[in-house]
Image: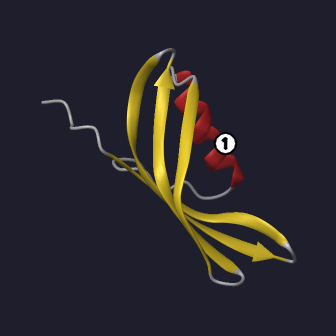
Amino acid sequence: MVLGAPTLKGREAITAGFQGLMDSGITAAALKTDELEDLGDTAIETGEYILYAGDDIADQGRFMVNWKNIYGKWYLHRDIINSTVAAAE
């Protein structure tokens, strides 16, 4: 779930969304987990991200991921990001 964009659902939509990021010039992403809460078969992760375009920071902000454990394997179930970069006027 990204501000100003439709929710991506399913493997094909998520793959296309990430391809769109790369096509727009994003070359790398850095993620830093601040907190991980284990709730048994569900876990909630919060943290910070930075998206790079070459050596430049293209965007940065916060994220929250809802993980689900299905038959012993962890799967990303929900993911939301919020930019902390002020919108251009």
Q: Residue furthest top?
A: 54
Q: In this view, does 88 lie to the left or right of 29?
A: left
Residue 68 position by quadrant: bottom right
Q: For the residue carrying disc 1, how many other residues have a C-alpha within 10 Å: few (<14), some (14-19), or many (20+)?
A: few
Q: Which residue is drawn at 66% across and 57% down?
A: 10
Image position, residue 46 (x, y; %): 49, 61
**27 over 9 or under it: above or below:** above
Q: Which residue is drawn at 40% across and 26% down?
A: 58
- Give whichever of 11, 35 is nearer the camera: 35
Image position, residue 22 (x, y; %): 58, 26
- Any part of residue 80 in sight: no
- Any part of residue 43 in sight: yes
- Give whichever of 73, 16 is nearer the camera: 73
Q: Residue at x 67, y 42 (%)?
A: 15
Q: Which residue lies furthest to the bottom in this view?
A: 40
Q: Is residue 79 left or right of residue 48?
A: right
Query: Which residue carries the number 1 mark?
Result: 15
Identify which amino acid the numbered label 1 is placed on.
Thr
Q: How many numbered markers are drawn?
A: 1
Q: Residue at x 62, y 39 (%)?
A: 16
